[in-house]
Amino acid sequence: MNVLVGDEINLDKYRGREVSGPELAEATALIMREITKLVEQLRGEKAPAELYDPVLHGQAVTGNFTKQKKES
């Protein structure tokens, strides 16, 4: 197993206050970009240009996807 730990992600812009929905989405996107860079290093290949979006594939954004699919 290979483990790669990246540098700390600077989230100072969001600390110490309540964040709005758009700001939360912005912070999440920032974190996902940094994680994607690390995964690219581990795999030795570039990630797809567009990240996987569960909503575009009929899945909920949050929750237990397997359980939700069975209940549908």
Image (tube, helix red, strand yellow):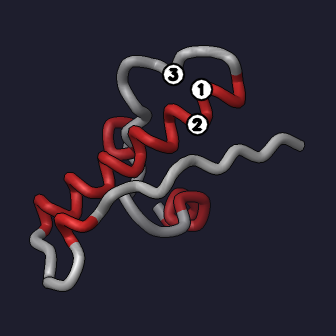
Give the residue pinned by disc 1: 40
Task: Give the secondary structure at mark 2.
Answer: helix
Q: Earlier in the sequence, mark 3 or mark 1?
A: 1
Looking at the image, residue 35 lies above or below residue 39: below
Is label 1 in a helix, a strand or a loop? Answer: helix
Query: Could you tell me which residue is drawn at 51 percent across and 32 percent down?
Result: 37
Contact between marks 2 and 1 (CB within 8 A): the answer is yes
Quick one: label 2, few (<14), some, or many (20+) residues within 10 Å? some
Q: Position of residue 46 (x, y in %)?
A: 54, 16
Q: At 39% from the left edge and 51% from the top edge, which residue is drawn?
A: 31
Of the residues shown, which amino acid type is indicated by label 1? Glu
Q: 27 above or below 39? A: below
Distance from Cα at disc 3 to Cα at disc 2: 10 Å
In the rendered image, which residue does mark 2 sit on? Answer: 38
Asked whether the beta carbons under mark 3 and mark 1 sit within 8 Å of each other, the answer is yes
Q: Quadrant of residue 57?
A: top left
Give the residue drawn at x 40%, y 31%. Answer: 51
Residue furthest right as drawn: 1
According to the image, label 3 marks what residue? 47
Q: Nearer the viewer, mark 3 or mark 1?
A: 1
Q: CA distance from mark 3 to mark 1?
A: 6 Å
Image quadrant assignment for residue 60: bottom left
Q: Amino acid at mark 3?
A: Ala
- Of residues 69 and 17, the one nearer the viewer is 17
Camera-side mark, 3 or 2: 2
- Quadrant in the picture for residue 14: bottom left
Q: At label 2, which amino acid type do we have?
A: Leu
Q: Mark 3 or mark 2, which has the lower sequence index?
A: 2
Q: Residues within 10 Å of mark 3 (few under 14, many from 20)?
A: few
